[in-house]
Image (cartoon, rainbow, N blue to C red):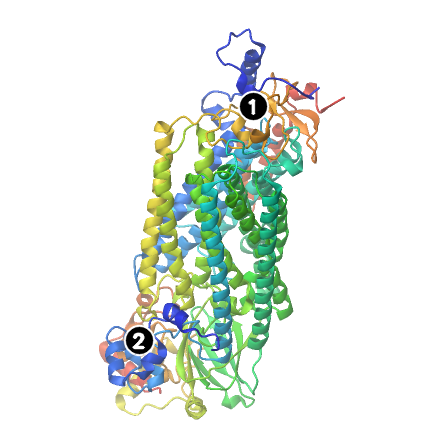
Amino acid sequence: MKGRFPISRLWWRPAMNRRAIERRSPGELESRLGRRHSLARAFMPGQSAPALAVAFGWQSVLDSAGPQAARIEDLWWVYFWVCAAVFVLVFLALVMAVFRGRRGKGDPTDPGAPHPPASERRLTRTVAGATAATAVILIGLLVATVAASRATSSLPGDPLTIELTGQQWWWQVRYEDPTPSRMVTTANEIHIPVGRPVRVKTRSTDVIHSFWVPNLHGKRDLIPGRPSEILIQADRPGVFRGQCAEFCGYQHANMALLVVAEPPETFAAWYEAQLQPARPPSDALQQRGKVVFEALPCPLCHTIAGTQASGKTAPDLTHLASRRMLAAGTLPNTRGHLGGWILDPQTIKPGNKMPAVSLGSDDLRALLAYLESLR
Amino acid sequence: MSRPKPKPKPEKVERDEPSTDPYEAEVRQLEETWKRPPGFIGWLSEVNHVAIGRRYLVTAFVFFALGGLLALLMRIQLSRPENDFLDPDLYNVIFTMHGSTMMFLFAVPIMEGMSIALVPLMIGTRNAAFPRLNAYSYWVYLIGGLLVYVCFLFNMAPDAGWFSYVPLSGPEFSPGKRVDVWAQLITFTEISALAAAVGTITTVFKQRAPGMSLNRMPLFVWSMLVKAFMVVFAMPAIVVASSLLAMDRLIATHFFNPSEGGDSLLWQHLFWFFGHPEVYIIFLPATGMVSTLVTAFSRRRTFGYLALVLALVATGFIGFGLWVHHMFAAGLPQLGQSFFTAASIMIAVPSGVQIFCWLATIWSARKLRLATPMLFVLGFIFIFVLGGLTGVMLASVPIDLQVHDTFFVVAHFHYVLIGGAVFPLLGALYYWIPKLTGRMMSERVGKLSFWVLFAGFNLTFFPMHQLGLRGMPRRVYTYKAEMGWGDLNLLATLGGVLLTVGVLLFVGNFLWSRRRGLPAGDNPWDADGLEWATTSPPPPYNFAWLPTVQGRHPLWEQTPDQPVVVGLRSDRREVLVTRTLDAEPDHREVQPRPTLVPLWLALATAVGFVGVIFTPWAIPAGLILAGAVLVGWFWPQVDQDETLLEEQP
């Protein structure tokens, strides 16, 4: 049973059941998802089926993919059914009271007269009983809450540690390792191994943000001056979306991140790839793109490991092409979107800190070729 | 000298008797003493509680309309994904203004207005205590509201949310004057609410009609009393918070700046220590209204009076122990969180008791009358129970961590604030407007407006529960089509349109009733409260002869030879002061005449608090001006001079 009730699924389910999507053939999936959903389409080439299946319910509280979210989902359904039952009872009592009251009893021309003591005693007993029942139900819910709180606040196993720094309006992700050369820095996309707990240390350098990936766990605020941490874990592979949940100014709406849960070996391969410095340009066009990049103001803010670009105030671009989205979940990472973003970031995400640059079409093509080579 | 003596009841006095009648002469004398000076200056110098209360109600309703309009703009923006109806900057301003307007310029002031207009009538006195302070509180409120809306026109309206979390609202991340305007709006609201609360407490404790001991006090008055005490204890926290924020912004202190040893979490504690009681400051008066309406339309004594009073007082206390449930996601220690979870869950018990007592009263009604006010009460119970239950869900830390700052919370607090406060308020307005204007509102339009509002409300806010569970955060100006939130958002927007129609029906009904409504008479509902013992609208002195009380439902329990109070002088503004517990007559107090001093003091306050947005020197300037005005305020008035605080023999 595990608290997952089929009826409630029917009513509260995400727009489309995730498992139902998984059962479909890739071609059918593409035709279903791809036409209307450009984000999903962006994931199509070279992505495995589970990664595709996330376009619906990929930011849903009720589609858990980790032990903590599953526990909270169970608790939610306990609360849901208890509260639904209470509501139905109160509503029935209200309807019956109105019907009885309409019929009336006693002499309405003398409203100040005391009621018959016997009926008042009955009412008193009923009200006292209802109050006691309320208290008992609430205590039961409190116990369930405390138990779930305890269960979700720790996870067994050796955790992977990530430092997550929120900034207006993107996320810096740094994988910690005792060996400094094995630390990885990336942005807006967190890869985690399935089945292993991940300790996310939450930091902020400007205002308060909140880290929230509903499919995995509840949220935790990133408060400047108050470092904190939260454990998460994914039990199945998939791409899960998270979004800043504390109002953080102008572009609060466009501050998303993706959590990519992968089998441990896939994760290890990804990690090794991320450890490498940026690929050197492999043809003349890319070489020209690198020159363009370094001539523009880009290196003042962005880092590309292995080059002179070492700015720290904007996302690390060393492996930009390996990421799925651009500008903290604002755009799919395709050549067209990347070009549009470079030329006119202020229309796409007004108020963000990236300035527009003017580029000739040849330079732009070269720059895009270079950036797209940063896998 | 102010002992109750048996006398004919005031309404027995025939108005067209010859003027030699001593009663008639006295009534004329009272009218002369209590009337307001003529003309516009007279209007500005008004200190009568009904008039001030009416101004509060009208002003707050105008702000309600403005806040609703802003909400409608947000709903249009969110009705489809990636809409570009509003740009992010304007959206942020609008949601900040919507929240601040509804909390600070509508919900709290309109409850103050109900309190100022009705409490003195309900407890049978001539005017509220501290009439000039009452007038001052209104002017300060009005200036605060005008300030923020004028700034809106000049693109200076706040944009950091109605909660203005630091560091976002601090000098570094919110340069310009926008947040300063917000902080000063808060200052004006604080002053106005504190002034009104002090007046309410004093009026209730010291001016009740003889016989109205505390345990006979109407539940409406109890709710306003508890509310006033909550204001007195909650407002200082936000006074501190907004002052520290203003200092951080204006004179570069670092109370909230973590890089200089300040603490950004401190703001949240101070804000929510005020912010959560604030919710009950809005909700408790509504429960008082519901108790009154349920009793009147069930035609029986309120069931469980004592339980209802205790529930009010308990809510007043527990309401101060919940604030951390707004901060569960900040990562506080687990033991502390459990305490606040328990407190947040516990507060459902007094609310439950209230619901059960109302149901019991309706159940055992002598003859339940489903007039428009009662429909709003039934709608309130439906909506508020739903909102209360989602509140119980939010008290649970794990569930809260998931749905905190999502549309689930938006749904929850609109269920408890609109369902819990606005529905009872509209019911109460249908019920008491005849008393304040002398005209009945249309029942047919009233019932229609109820059903439209009820449907519109649920259509707007119910889908938001689902949106929250599907991951839609609050305060986002747009969302991607891929998120699949479009359909429910469109539904909510359509509901918002319906809700607007419902409000317009109410306003239309009110305006229609002013001209065409049937005359209300003294007691159109055959209700129990003292406010129905005088004419509609009440004369400026409220009662020709102050009533006495011998039960919780004065008009239902009065005897044919019910005594009235005599012995108050009618040639100056005297009110009867009674003892706190048992309301035994104690002494007579002379009230000040209408005066412009409250307005001058409000303007001096405004010089200080509006000016400080631009220069810190405005504070000393405002203080000096206010000091000068206060000299006039405290200058003894001649008729007070003669017999100050005459103790009874």
Looking at the image, which residue is at 63% across and 44% down? B306
Above or below B13: residue B333: below
Mark 1 element type = loop
| Residue B289 in view of the camera | yes
Toward the viewer: A21 or B179? Answer: A21
Q: Amino acid at mark 1?
A: Phe
| Residue B169 in view of the camera | no
Mark 2 element type = helix
Q: Position of residue A103 (x, y in %)?
A: 45, 42
Query: Of the numbered discs in the image, which one, if any, rests on residue B543?
Result: 1
Looking at the image, which residue is at 39% across and 64% down? B467
**Image quarter hosting the N terminus of chain B:** top right
Above or below B132: residue A50: below
Query: Of the numbered discs in the image, which one, if any, rests on residue B206?
Result: none
Toward the viewer: A336 or A123? Answer: A123
Above or below A214: residue B287: above
Q: Amino acid at mark 2?
A: Leu
Chain to which mark 1 belongs: B
Q: CA distance from mark 1 to mark 2?
A: 71 Å
In the current view of this chain or complex, which residue is farthest to the right? B649
Which one is in front in this view, the residue at disc 1 or the one at disc 2?
1
In the picture of the structure, the residue carrying the numbered disc 2 is A39
The image quarter containing residue A347 is bottom left
Chain to which mark 2 belongs: A
